[in-house]
Image (spheres, rainbow, N blue to C red):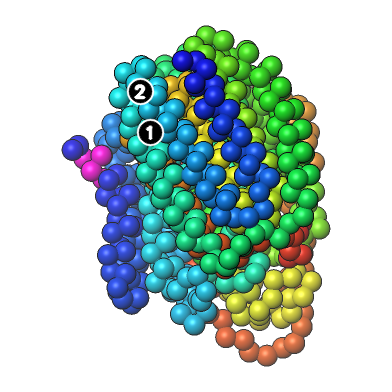
């Protein structure tokens, strides 16, 4: 096996191999930390050596575009694993999961995402997407409650029913070309009516999991009820992984207008719903819909660099948003925006929450701003004025809504007095938001 | 011989109607097993007539995983209460709505999709049956509140895909088998949920 293939096999297997120690929770936590660190180091190695290793074509199909998704997944994996050490306390986990099962599922979940973005077969990509549902569904029930069970169920049934439509699309691709190998199909460029139908169905199918209108209803439920490290993985990397698959199908026969119309509608509806959000985690879930669809627009109109910067920066920014709101929910036992009191006593968490909200709303000089700017500029260059106008209304609306709500939470006033801030959780949250800022600053410094 | 295929296809659609009109869980689950069994019969029949070995593997996979294992896990997930049924009224009216829903969907799909895109396919009208089943499954998910019925709706959708694949082209067996195992995994997770949450209703915290 050549170097690149071996490296990818290791990357996919390492998170799952961490589960060998599942007989003992302490050993499992340690092996998860080790596996997430090694995974991140390997993906950095892949990024550094991409000149000599890429493209990897064979069992896997990895280009320099894919490497950023692998890096994104492993970065949030490491952050979420460390965050979980403090967040997932054994006494808090009951019902369907115990903390052992939590870590086991977390590791399998990461493996399934890595498999999804790397494999060189549309059929296996579909299986990878479904595997992510199987491995992550029960994670939502970690904080066992009536609401979290309902959210889990909605996630399973809506996403699975939606992704079934994507399988129609895969069958049509195979019928047309008699192969499902991604690298072969991307080099063919033989559009036809059937492939047009397949690409359209993929938007409904995979779009359900990406958060495309109108099938995104599961997303705020699952994101708000999952424990914060899992919400960070969902929002930061699961959705981009499926977006990656959708983009690969889209490349077979770009139906730009259809994809653009649905993405713009998604952003518009999400920004309107954002104005009256009452739950801090649901607020960030709707912001995810907005960011994912902006990235989809970027990919659709031929601005993959903008989409990539947006996704990368969003992954860290949104992870930080969920991490910091997780600190608030855990310490203050509150989710309602209007009910938060004394948040500013949690110095690190409130700072990172503020930074995260600026990051996910595309404030300069965060990476999300750079991505959004590139995408909007391309829309203007291509003469796509109507979507541009809608976005220029929706994006500021989203910016004001999220920052207004977050400021309300942070500067809520309330009783004075000491509150013990969880050190690991708050630090991880702050680190994550700073990385999002660094991505933007780094890009601006290198390009300008 | 064409008549045999059409007969089996029709019975498959009838099982979907039976599932829609049934409030008791056990008969619903068994009807799903029959539906999957009939699909495997179709697969074996096509293997016999075309000589393509893939159909044999597909038939075996359907009967082992979908008709047997999925049925086993669903029955296991079901609470062991005698005559356990869904807390719903108006099953018959749901059936009527279902009929209207799927006939409308079918006409649209047939007119805009099948007659336009699949004219070159041999026996292209057979694809109509898979679309019938797909919309039956979708409606079952939409119209019911219980976990079991909604899982069955999802399995019906998956069955429709197998049917679609059978009449269009069998996809590589390795991919097909993985899809089956995937569905089994999902049913396993769902049957775990069935034990703690049998029904689903609107929850105030999940609004907006």
Q: Please tell me which residue is depicted at 66% across the width and 67% down the height of the picture.
A: A147
Residue A191 drawn at (x, y percent): 52, 15
Q: Secondary structure at mark 2?
A: helix
Which chain letter matches label 2?
A: B
* Main secondary structure type of the part rendered in magenta: helix
Q: Please tell me which residue is depicted at 53% across the width and 62% down the height of the picture.
A: B78
Q: In the rendered image, is residue A224 in sight?
A: no
Which quadrant of the view contains residue A388? top right
Residue A141 drawn at (x, y percent): 55, 66
Residue that label 2 marks: B47
- Is A245 above or below relative to B184? above
Q: In the rendered image, is residue A29 in sight?
A: yes
Which region is colored magenta?
A3-7
Which mark, by number, is residue B59?
1
Which mark, by number, is residue A32?
none
Q: Specify few, some or many for label 2: CA neighbours under 10 Å numbering under 14, 14-19, or 20 or more.
A: some
Residue B62 drawn at (x, y percent): 41, 38
Q: Nearer the viewer, residue A311 or A161?
A: A161
B197 horizontally vs A10: left or right: right
A180 horizontally vs A420: left or right: left
Q: Specify few, some or many for label 1: CA neighbours under 10 Å numbering under 14, 14-19, or 20 or more.
A: many
Which quadrant of the view contains residue B177? top left
Q: Please tell me which residue is depicted at 66% across the width and 80% down the height of the picture.
A: A332
Of the numbered discs 1 and 2, the one sitting upstream in the chain is 2
Instruction: Please report contact status of discs 1 and 2: CB closer than 8 Å, yes or no.
Output: yes
Q: Residue furthest left?
A: A1
């Amino acid at each position: 096996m050549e170097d690149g293939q071996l490296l990818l096999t290791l990357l996919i297997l390492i998170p799952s191999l961490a589960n060998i120690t599942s007989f003992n929770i302490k050993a499992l936590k340690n092996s998860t930390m080790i596996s997430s660190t090694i995974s991140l180091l390997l993906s950095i190695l892949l990024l550094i050596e991409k000149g000599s290793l890429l493209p990897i074509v064979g069992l896997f199909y990895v280009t320099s575009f894919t490497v950023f998704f692998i890096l994104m997944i492993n970065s949030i994996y490491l952050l979420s694993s460390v965050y979980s050490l403090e967040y997932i306390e054994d006494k808090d986990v009951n019902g369907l999961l115990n903390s052992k099962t939590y870590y086991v599922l977390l590791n399998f979940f990461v493996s399934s995402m890595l498999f999804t973005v790397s494999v060189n077969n549309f059929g296996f990509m579909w299986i990878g997407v479904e595997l992510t549902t199987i491995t992550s569904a029960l994670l939502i029930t970690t904080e066992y409650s009536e609401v979290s069970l309902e959210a889990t169920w909605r996630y399973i049934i809506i996403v699975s029913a939606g992704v079934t439509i994507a399988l129609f699309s895969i069958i049509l691709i195979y019928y047309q070309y008699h192969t499902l190998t991604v690298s072969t199909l991307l080099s063919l460029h033989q559009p036809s009516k059937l492939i047009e139908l397949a690409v359209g169905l993929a938007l409904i199918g995979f779009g359900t999991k990406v958060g495309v209108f109108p099938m995104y209803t599961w997303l705020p439920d699952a994101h708000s009820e999952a424990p914060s490290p899992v919400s960070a993985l969902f929002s930061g990397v699961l959705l981009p992984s499926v977006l990656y698959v959708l983009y690969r199908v889209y490349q077979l026969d770009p139906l730009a207008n259809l994809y653009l119309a649905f993405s713009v509608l998604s952003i518009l509806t999400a920004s309107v719903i954002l104005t009256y959000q009452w739950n801090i985690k649901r607020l960030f879930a709707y912001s995810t819909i907005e960011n994912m669809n902006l990235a989809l627009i970027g990919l659709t109109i031929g601005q993959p660099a903008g989409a990539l910067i947006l996704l990368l920066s969003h992954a860290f920014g949104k992870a930080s948003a969920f991490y910091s709101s997780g600190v608030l929910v855990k310490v203050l036992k509150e989710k309602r925006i209007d009910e938060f009191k004394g948040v500013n006593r949690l110095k690190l968490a409130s700072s990172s929450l503020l930074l995260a909200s600026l990051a996910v709303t595309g404030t300069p000089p965060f990476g999300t701003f750079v991505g959004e700017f590139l995408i909007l500029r391309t829309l203007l260059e291509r003469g796509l004025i109507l979507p541009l106008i809608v976005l220029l209304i929706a994006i500021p609306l989203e910016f004001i809504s999220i920052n207004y709500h977050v400021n309300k939470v942070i500067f809520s006033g309330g009783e004075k007095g000491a509150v013990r801030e969880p050190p690991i959780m708050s630090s991880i949250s702050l680190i994550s938001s700073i990385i999002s800022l660094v991505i933007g600053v780094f890009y601006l410094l290198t390009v300008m | 011989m064409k008549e045999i295929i059409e007969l089996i296809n029709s019975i498959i659609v009838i099982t979907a109607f039976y599932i829609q009109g049934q409030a008791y869980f056990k008969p619903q689950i068994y009807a799903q097993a029959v539906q999957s069994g009939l699909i495997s019969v179709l697969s074996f029949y096509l293997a016999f007539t075309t000589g393509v070995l893939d159909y044999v593997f597909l038939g075996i996979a359907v009967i082992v995983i979908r008709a047997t294992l999925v049925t086993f896990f669903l029955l296991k997930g079901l609470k062991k209460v005698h005559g356990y049924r869904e807390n719903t009224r108006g099953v018959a009216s749901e059936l009527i709505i279902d009929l209207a829903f799927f006939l409308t969907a079918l006409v649209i799909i047939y007119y805009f999709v099948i007659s336009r895109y699949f004219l070159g396919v041999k026996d292209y009208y057979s694809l109509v049956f898979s679309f019938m089943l797909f919309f039956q499954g979708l409606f079952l998910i939409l119209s019911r509140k219980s976990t079991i019925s909604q899982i069955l709706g999802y399995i019906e959708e998956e069955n429709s895909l197998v049917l679609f694949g059978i009449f269009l082209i069998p996809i590589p067996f390795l991919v097909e088998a993985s899809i089956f195992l995937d569905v089994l995994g999902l049913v396993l997770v769902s049957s775990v949920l069935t034990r703690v949450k049998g029904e689903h209703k609107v929850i105030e915290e999940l609004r907006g």
